[in-house]
Image: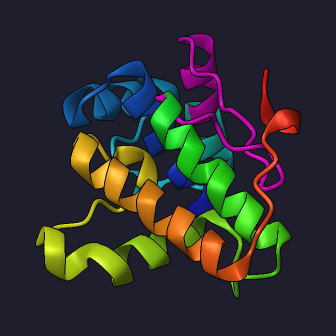
Amino acid sequence: MSAALQRMIFVGCKQLGLDDDARHDLQLAATGKASLSEMTEDEKKRVLERLKLAGFNPAVRRKSAKAKRAPRADLRLIHVLWAKLGEAGALRDPSRKGLNTFIRARFEKAWQSVPADVDMLREWHQIDDVIQALKAWADREEADFDFGEHRK
């Protein structure tokens, strides 16, 4: 638990914009010790409470939480096309990770550099390359692209 508390303290300091000196000052004020490695678990809990009083709000992350929507409509189309290919049974990995793997494998040589995530694509020609490749794949698989249920 102590390592988790220490990580939470670092996250709290980052969220509050505290640098190392400010963190050490806060730790010293809360426990009389400037170094986390010298603190007991209870002392680390006191530091964490001080961070919460200063405005730190530890957000609970859930792995089942739905991913944010892509920032642009053309990127959202890529996700929809990928999902439709998954529904058609054409994909080994219909997840976001699978989509990123597909893009890396298909376009890395042509583009010289591929972003870590599909939603980081910004060049219109790269986005269009992905859309066209997914449409061609769907044609080969004879996948049904009825978009009526995806309109919002």
In the rendered view, does 119 fall on the left or right side of 122? right
Quarter of the image with the N terminus is: bottom right
Pick the residue in front: 77 or 49: 77
Q: Is residue 8 visible?
A: no
Q: Is residue 3 left or right of residue 152?
A: left
Q: Quadrant for the C terminus, please.
A: top right
Can you tell which quarter of the image residue 81 is in? Answer: bottom right
Where residue 123 appears, as percent x and y from the top left, is 22, 43
Above or below for 67 versus 51: below
* Residue sitting at x 82%, y 73%: 88
In percent of width and height, residue 136 lies at: 52, 70
- Which residue is found at the position 77% from the left and 43% from the top? 66
Colour theme: rainbow
Instruction: Please state the horizontal and vertical placement of residue 107, each as a whole percent of the image.
Output: 28, 74
As for residue 63 lying within the magenta part, the answer is yes
Q: Position of residue 69 (x, y in %)?
A: 62, 34
Residue 78 in view here: yes
Q: Quadrant of residue 77?
A: top right
